[in-house]
Image (tube, rainbow, N blue to C red):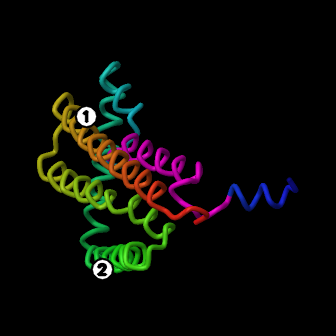
């Protein structure tokens, strides 16, 4: 098989039967659950284990990121919501009405991320108002991470189920 055929076969837009889509799905959800409010999980663990300076660094990082998230949503929130709603509506229409597999795959990947964004924004607003520190802050961030992982698990399950259904129901040679 010539190299160009191998290259174009690897970049095929048959989303649900492509290894690249499933890798992108896993990497997206791994990143979403690793970075909670812009704070990596290893910093969260490090602050719990070693306390003192690490906990202070975590508190500063959370304060900076929550202020940044809330400020950006206060300035551009309406435009972000409009752009996301338009994009997801277009993907849903193109994907499910016109049966374009690539649009379906992108929709299935990005729709659950709306819930992650809403949870992060809500948590950022609450953390900015409450100014939690120490163990209470760590618990809140850990609980937030568990919620995001739950959304990820449901999303991966639904996407995998739909992908199997799509591949099984597709006509031969599609």
Tell me the residue at 40%/65% (across/down).
Answer: 107
Q: Give the answer, above or below, for where 32 lies relative to 92.
A: above
Horizontal and vertical percent position of residue 28: 45, 50
Residue 163, quarter of picture:
bottom left
Q: Main secondary structure of the magenta part?
A: helix
Which badge, 2 or 1, is on the more N-terminal residue? 2
Tell me the residue at 26%/53% (across/down).
Answer: 120
Tell me the residue at 33%/77% (across/down).
Answer: 89
Quarter placement of the C terminus: bottom right
Q: Which mark is residue 168?
A: none
Residue furthest right in the image: 2
**Between tags 2 and 1, which lies in front?**
2
* Residue extent of the magenta highlight: 11-36
Q: Give the answer, above or below, for where 59 lies relative to 20.
A: above
Judged from the image, the secondary structure of the residue bearing numbered disc 2 is: helix
Horizontal and vertical percent position of residue 58: 33, 36
Judged from the image, the secondary structure of the residue bearing numbered disc 1 is: helix
Taking the image as shown, residue 7 lies to the left or right of residue 31, namely right
Tell me the residue at 71%/58% (across/down).
Answer: 9
Horizontal and vertical percent position of residue 41: 38, 35
- Residue 34 included in the magenta stretch of the image: yes
Residue furthest top in the image: 49
Residue furthest front in the image: 172
Q: Which residue is mark 2?
A: 82
- Residue 67 included in the magenta stretch of the image: no
Q: Give the answer, above or below, for where 144 lies relative to 125.
A: above
Residue furthest left in the image: 130
Q: Nearer the viewer, residue 144 or 108?
A: 108
Q: Which residue is mark 1?
A: 142
Horizontal and vertical percent position of residue 83: 35, 78
Taking the image as shown, residue 133 lies to the left or right of residue 165, namely left
């Amino acid at each position: 098989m010539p190299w160009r055929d191998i290259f174009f076969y690897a970049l095929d837009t048959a989303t649900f039967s492509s290894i690249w889509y499933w890798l992108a799905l896993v990497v997206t959800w791994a990143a979403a659950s690793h970075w909670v409010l812009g704070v990596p999980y290893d910093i969260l663990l490090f602050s719990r284990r070693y306390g003192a300076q690490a906990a202070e660094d975590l508190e500063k990082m959370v304060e900076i990121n929550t202020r940044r998230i809330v400020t950006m949503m206060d300035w551009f929130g309406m435009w972000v919501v409009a752009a996301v709603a338009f994009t997801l509506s277009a993907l849903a229409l193109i994907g499910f009405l016109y049966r374009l597999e690539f649009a379906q795959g992108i929709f299935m990947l990005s729709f659950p991320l709306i819930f992650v964004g809403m949870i992060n924004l809500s948590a950022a607003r609450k953390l900015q108002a409450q100014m939690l520190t120490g163990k209470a802050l760590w618990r809140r961030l850990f609980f937030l991470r568990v919620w995001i992982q739950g959304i990820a698990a449901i999303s991966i399950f639904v996407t995998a189920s739909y992908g199997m259904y799509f591949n099984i129901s597709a006509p031969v040679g599609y």
